[in-house]
Image: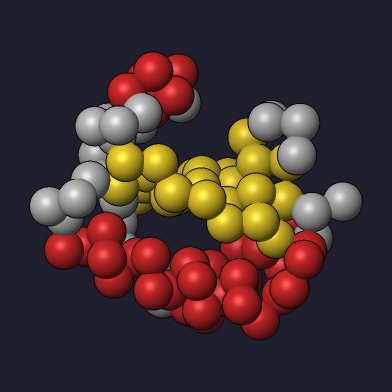
């Protein structure tokens, strides 16, 4: 079953752009086992609040049913993202 990697970001956030690159690089290596999506907290405040996102960038890994598997704030490296995903695939 694929997992979903969601980046909660804001359009003015330089760290969010760096995080997006790391996540896209990691997801690109894993094919259809991981789905990537991004939520701009200004455009999706309800979802961001439901997930208790208080800082950008925040990355949340969920199962397809929406249950949270892991979360991290800040800018990860591609290797860190791959290590996180390996624990949940």
Res. 26 visible in picture: yes
> In the figure, 29 relative to 82: above or below?
below
Q: Where is residue 55 in the image (x, y as percent from the top left)?
A: 24, 39
Q: Residue at x 24, y 32 (%)?
A: 42
The quarter holding residue 83 reads: bottom right
As drawn, the residue found furthest toward the left would be 12
As drawn, the residue found furthest toward the front would be 43
Q: Residue at x 77, y 66 (%)?
A: 32
The quarter holding residue 44 reads: top left
- Report the side of 15 relative to 2 (left or right): left
The quarter holding residue 89 reads: bottom right
Q: Where is residue 63 in the image (x, y as percent from the top left)?
A: 73, 41
Q: Residue at x 61, y 77 (%)?
A: 28
Res. 87 visible in picture: no
The residue closer to the viewer here, 89 or 1, is 1
Q: Where is residue 74 in the image (x, y as percent from the top left)?
A: 30, 56
The residue closer to the viewer here, 39 or 66, is 39
> In the figure, 63 relative to 42: above or below?
below
> In the figure, 16 relative to 31: above or below?
above
Q: Which residue is drawn at 27% across and 59% down?
A: 16
What's the image's color scheme?
Answer: secondary structure
Give the tally of numbered discs: 0
The residue closer to the viewer here, 79 or 2, is 2
The residue closer to the viewer here, 79 or 20, is 20
């Amino acid at each position: 079953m694929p997992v979903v990697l969601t980046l909660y970001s804001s359009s003015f956030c330089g760290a969010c752009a760096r995080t997006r690159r790391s996540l896209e690089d990691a997801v690109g290596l894993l094919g259809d086992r991981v789905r990537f999506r991004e939520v701009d907290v200004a455009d999706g405040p309800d979802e961001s609040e439901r997930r208790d996102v208080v800082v950008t960038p925040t990355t949340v890994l969920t199962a397809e049913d929406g249950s949270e598997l892991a979360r991290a704030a800040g800018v990860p490296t591609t290797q860190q993202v791959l290590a996180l995903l390996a624990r949940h695939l």
